[in-house]
Image: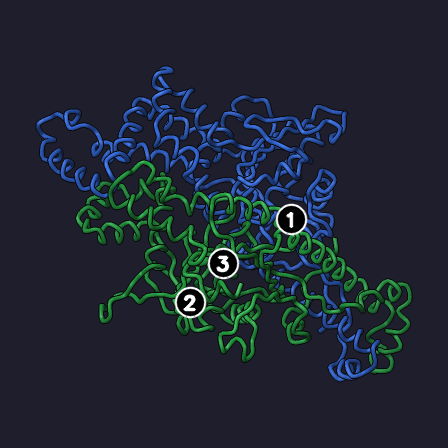
Chain colours: A green, B blue
Amino acid sequence: MLKVLDRARLLVVTGKGGTGKTTVAASLGVAAAGRGRRVLVAEVEGRQGLAGLFGRGELDYREARVGERLHALAVDPDESLREYLARYGFAPLARLLTWANLNRFITAAAPGLGDVLLVGKVWEAATRQVRPGSGGPGAYDLVVLDAPPTGRVVPFLRAPETVAELARVGPIRHQADRVKDLLDDPERTAVVLTCLPEELPVAETLEGVAALREAGLPVAGVVANRVTGDRLGGRAARLPALARDPGPLAAAAAGAGAGAELDRAALGTLVEEARDRQRLVTRERRLLKELRAGLDGLPMVELPFLAGGVAGPEEVRALAGHLVPAGPGAAAGVVEEQELAPDRSGRDQARRAAGAGSGGG
Amino acid sequence: MSPRTPATAAGRPARGTSAPAAVAGATSPLAELARSARIIVCCGSGGVGKTSTAAAVALWAAQSGRRTCVLTIDPARRLAQALGLDLLSNAPRPVRAKALPARGPGSLDAMMLDMRRTFDEVIERYARDTEQADRILANRFYQRLSSTLAGTQEYMAMEKLYELHESQRYDLLVVDTPPTRSALDFLDAPDNLNELLDARAFRLLIAPAQRIGRGYLRGLNLATTAMTKMVRRVTGSELLAEVGEFFAAFEGMYDGFKARAGLVYDQLKHPSTAFVVVATPEGAALREAAYFAGRLAADRMPLGALVVNRIHQARPVPEVPAAARRRLAADGADGRLLADLLELHDGLETLAEAEQRRVRELLASVPNLGVVQVPLLADDVHDLAGLRRLGDYLFT
């Protein structure tokens, strides 16, 4: 995953709906910027999910600075069309299209054509060369794309080619060819899938990897999101016995002067809740093992479940911290493939991830 | 902290107040819908359990004696998994009989939309003759539009839904929609379709000059010729020609399409339809749910209920003073374990409270919305037994 953060020009983040694509895209962007790259995080689905994560009210088609070496924007098809036409010297046409209500035709009636413009805009930002002193928007080392969900991502990324099949010459054809060059190049492009440690998302992630590979898109890895922290570890094995007889816990409670609050009923509740959670942890471990086996050597990184949810920049920074290892090696640019288990950094992480999930119901 | 009221799984009455706890024994707002609605549309953002919820509602209705069909337009084959069907076709198929009680008139069919096939069927239905249908079906722009380019499936879902409704083969159709943004396209489909067909300027642009013909249009004609030249330079001429042929071939089908889209829209607005917004208690999913509920209200669509899946629950435990906690953590293995159990409980309580607060905030913004809360289930719902368990939470 780190290799990708340091080398790729375009990082496409996709995944089953609800698995945290936007959060992961923002965290990858923050992580890469933290490693010294100039990063743009782009959202294309118009949900305004990025804005809150970067602590802003709203993002629009303009590239806004949201941190050190970090910019973000929400790509808008209408604006991309105007920009596209202006770039090729067709500004008057853009005004004519507006007059003829064709923007709506393109972006509302046939969203696939809108996809061409969205992908084109992302391609433009990823390959932009800036002339010194041009005064325009800056160049980026990496564009992180918060892409449509797995079911839609292949047609989305291939939309320029699809339309170009009908156009053998002209700027659309030309641009489509160059978009394809970028997307097909594993040195420059990397697709990352987000997943949850749940049954259907795991199955869909494996299907998604296969579909992306079949389409010739370079898959770089999977981020398993919202993994419940294993706070108890091996001690969980004591829970069944403690459920039958909470004596040892009662003794500890009495010794600490909390015997009145923690009576047998309260201790029973605590043990039951921990057992529910442990069932969840065990199930997640099994599913992640299945996922790992299905990925067949493809890198996988885990992100912890944050009990308070991911509401803003603070949580995004915490998640970014899980994506890159801290320490002198990273600072010196010494990079290895590394998997981060949620229990890796011990209590600190457990504190942040505390309270994730009960298996009750 | 003091002992807390646990969150419960029961439904609460259809009032938009911010009363904190669910009311035990209250009738689920879904029960009435599953008894009387003709169409139930489940919508919400991705990964919130829409497909399972739609299937569980359909199964419940079938078991209570209604002829039911559940329709998914989600491209992932999740419903197929949930219903134990290996393959869904573009026509409803009965869900294995042994899965349903033999008694009573109820039945359950399921189908997944093949949007390309549906689009072709619609073309065939509305074309003047096979010659017109063949011209459209052979058009490359049409082929791209109907199979690859996103957005078309929502139009086609509308068509299929209406076709099934008109057939009167079912008492209840339960529709599972794609994630919210696309689901809004579903709602917008009649308007979008009309806009597509009404892009007269576009037809003017691509039509051969002689069609415009009349003297008073001469100036416009000159302008469009200049525009056509520019468009050709941008797109390459073949694309434009294909699009032009598509619109030309489509001539005469507009009115039928538009009329039909209007009928579908009217049916969605009809009181016998109910929209069920599905969410999880996470911020993003609830924001999408709020947006969707607001959007449905703005279009005066019948909003039936809110289903919140995967609710966390913490049971009450007396507060332990901080000093005692410190002593526990510094104690031997048993003390540290107990301190960790307390922290896990605190985390769960924080999570459960945050979820209830977010649900209340949503309910405060949407008046008169009945809500059903479903606890986090120990297992994913991926078979009929799982759907029945989910149904128990949804309806009781």
Q: Badges 2 and 3: C-beta atoms under 8 Å apart?
A: no
Residue drawn where x is 31% and y is 67% of the image? A138
Chain hosting mark 3: A
**Residue B23 visible in the current orientation:** no
Residue drawn where x is 71% and y is 31% of the image? B64
Q: Which residue is mark 1?
A: B372
Label 3 SS: helix
Q: Which residue is mark 2?
A: A56
Between the residue at mark 2 and the residue at mark 3, the CA separation in whole angstroms equals 15 Å
Q: Nearer the viewer, residue B345 or B265?
A: B345
Q: Quadrant of the C terminus of chain B?
A: top right
Q: Is residue B302 above or below residue B139?
A: below
Q: Is residue B174 left or right of residue A176?
A: right
Q: Residues within 10 Å of mark 2 (few under 14, many from 20)?
A: some
Chain hosting mark 1: B
Q: Position of residue B320 (x, y in %)?
A: 77, 77
Q: Residues within 10 Å of mark 1 (few under 14, many from 20)?
A: many
Q: Position of residue B228 (x, y in %)?
A: 18, 37
Give me the disc on residue B301: none
**Viewer-side label of 1, 2:** 2
Give me the disc on residue A22: 3
Q: Amino acid at mark 2?
A: Arg
Between the residue at mark 3 and the residue at mark 1, the CA separation in whole angstroms equals 28 Å
Mark 2 and mark 3, same subunit?
yes
Label 1 SS: strand
